[in-house]
Image (cartoon, helix red, strand yellow):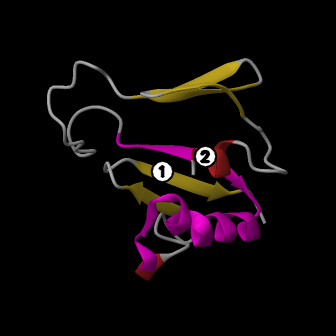
Amino acid sequence: MAEALLAKEGATTRFAREGMWAEGESWAAGGAYLTLTTSPNLSTTVHDRRAPGVNHLAFSGGSRADVDAIIAAAPEHGWRPLYQERYPHAGGPDHYAGWLENSAGFKAEVVAGAP
């Protein structure tokens, strides 16, 4: 699913996977990079996004149709859609986005650009 979010055709900023290893992967675009990894020094094996730290990452998903396609395909890639009863406006009436959660409890927001 990281690939669907980060390397999506037509995205404003298209990330390319730069590296992949057993504990993670690294993506880069336009001089910025994002590394997703599991620390060997975890204080617990359960992630709680409500604890201090990162709550979620937001990604530009392209058009509204692109966001809809990513959200629809998410379960095939191990991600569960969140807030479906309020989709696509869970963030407010002027915010078109979908939220996803993986089995480890990490949350990603996929945001559509202006219509």
**Quarter of the image with the C terminus in it:** bottom right
What percent of the width, then of the height, locates residue 38?
36, 28
Residue at 35% across, 42% down:
55
Residues tagged 2 and 1 counted as in contact (Cβ below 8 A): yes
* Closer to the camera in the image, 14 or 42: 42
One can see residue 11 in this view? yes
Residue at 77% across, 23% down:
30
What percent of the width, then of the height, locates residue 57?
48, 42
Q: How many marks?
A: 2
Q: Earlier in the sequence, mark 2 or mark 1?
A: 2
- Dividing the picture into quarters, in which one does residue 19 lie? top right
Q: Which residues are magenta?
A: 55-84
53 above or below 11? above
Quickly name the residue at label 1: 108
Residue at 56% across, 73% down:
88
One can see residue 96 in this view? no
Q: Residue furthest right?
A: 10
Quickly name the residue at label 2: 59
Q: Residue furthest left?
A: 44
